[in-house]
Amino acid sequence: MPQYTAPVRDTRFVLDHVVRLDSYSNLPGFQAVSPDLVTAVLEEGGRFAAEVLFPLNQVGDQVGCTRHDDGSVSTPPGFKQAYDQYVEGGWTTLHAPEEFGGQGLPSVIATAFGEYVLSSNQAFEMYHGLTAGAIAAILVKGSDEQKQKYVPNMVAGKWTGTMNLTEPHCGTDLGLIRTRAVPNADGSYAITGTKIFISSGEQDLTENIIHLVLAKTPGAPESSKGISLFIVPKVLVNDDGSLGERNALSCGSIEHKMGIHGNSTCVMNYDGATGWLVGEENKGLAAMFIMMNAARLGVGLQGLAQGEVAYQNAVHYARDRRQGRALTGPADPEEKADTLFVHPDVRRMLMDGKALTEGLRALCLWGALQNDLSHNAATEEERLAADDLISLLTPVIKGYGTDKGFDIAVTSQQVYGGHGYIREWGMEQYVRDARIAQIYEGTNGIQAMDLVGRKLAQNGGRALQAFFKVVAQDVAEAKTDPRTSPLAEALEKTNGQLQAATMWLMQNAMTNPNNAGAGAHSYMHIMGIVAVGLMWVRMAVAAAKLIDENSGDYDKEWLEAKLVTARYFAERVMPEAGALRRKIEGGAESLMALSPEMFAAR
């Protein structure tokens, strides 16, 4: 049977020595973040995830959700009770504004807790997962009346929020949407259309669901410039805040999916449902992107989370399973066979998992810090710098993070051999659940094109240059210690590969835009390697200092393992950047040369 333990010590190490929370205690939101508070959130949150949510993970996968004839949906056994505990514990309020009933804590704290929930039960987390993004969109673009009417109950967890973009005939190309919003005499709109792939579109956990729906008003441009955003509640809300009549919307069916069976992914039918415009007419895409950017960072965290729980189980299995003998001779002569840990190829898979999960954890938490600083840093210059970095790295965290999370799930399954393919061991569920993260909230190919096509050139390349500067500064610091100097030199070389790839794209994408498209995925992965490499430099520097200080918070063996894992990342992962650069420089010619007919020719 699978198991899960929240990696509290590793999270705390990153928060204290990479993110360095204590250095921001003067900023709004950070002032209440004491060491005791952080410890309480991580330890209690980790316990809740492991003891309450994790036991429901296989139940949710095997039983799934049930749609009834009246369009209502029942979530898997135990989900309702667990959700009530989730709300009672105040977990929905961590990062929400105090004005609307939240605790106002930095998103970096909520991100740390969010990883634990996602590792323990991704399908469960998704019921409230998009609500934070919906709240953000309403707070930025909604009217004061809309904020007061909807946000407090969403913060409290009494209501959840969803995002309705995709339709049967269009996904990424939102300009093709057909859902219509016709004005009513009272200022509301009648929303008619069908949306698909709507996570948590219908459920029995909360008394209301606040759907954010993209639609077009009469006479709007047929392109994406004609999209508007609407609040469409499942149950209409009266002026006094009480619930009124059921709105004219329903779950037409539940998608039969490869994974995340415990979450109700719905086809939503809007049959003249009453909705209200959020922000300006025809400006809905900008409003929705507030929600989408938050969701993309959350999906990157999903990649880490599924990789982490799969890796943990692979480690436990490798410790217990005895097969064959070490190449250098029996490690346990008194036993009939040695454990899987003696085999270098098993070690390769486990070291990949360890290096990538710990590196991605640091990157996700550091990214969450940049998000906090973009709103709350002391100066406009600092806020702009943080916004530049998180805007640049959002497609990397989402794309590279989920690609690697899936890879970790697959190799962790491989450690089990045939048992990994059998349902009762739980590993095949992690592979299936991790797969969706590469697809939704913009496929990873879209993330790569967003990075190369938009983010690199934005503001004259200001964000990219800032990122290069951050890497150079950390490399210079790490070079002063012989324990971290080789890692710093490896990162410097890898960053050079990224810079050279950037220059090649600048020189060749203008003459042939397909060169950018052909190289985008490889470029995103080089930047992912550099970004995670930057985190490993910081973790190695911190570990070396703590060893020198003989810190009582971390034992020496644990800290030395950080240094070894950093070296592994430098020796076994960073060299991939050179091959990726050569792929980019191969250009688009052979990629685009064949006619569509030749792909089918056999």
Image: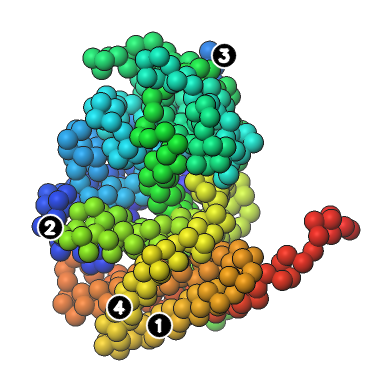
Kindly identify which numbered label has been placed on residue 258: none
Residue at 50 percent of width and 42 percent of height: 225
Residue at x 49% of width, y 21% of height: 182
Q: Residue 472, percent across and down?
A: 33, 80
Q: Tell which of 563 and 212 is nearer to you.
A: 212
Return the mark for residue 69: 3
Amino acid at the residue labelled 3:
Asp
Amino acid type, callout 4? Asp
Q: Distance of mark 3 from mark 2, alpha carbons?
A: 53 Å
Sequence-wise, the earlier of marks 4 and 2 is 2
Badge 3 or badge 4: first in the primary sequence = 3
Question: CA separation, marks 3 and 1?
Answer: 61 Å
Q: Is residue 178 visible?
A: yes
Which residue is under mark 2? 25
Distance from the alpha carbon under mark 1 to that under mark 2: 32 Å
- Say what amino acid the circle numbered 2 marks: Ser
Say whether marks 1 and 2 touch (CB < 8 Å).
Answer: no
Of the two numbered discs 3 and 1 on the same chain, state the one appearing first in sequence: 3
Residue wearing tag 1: 492
Disc 4 designates what residue? 474
Q: What element carries label 4?
A: helix
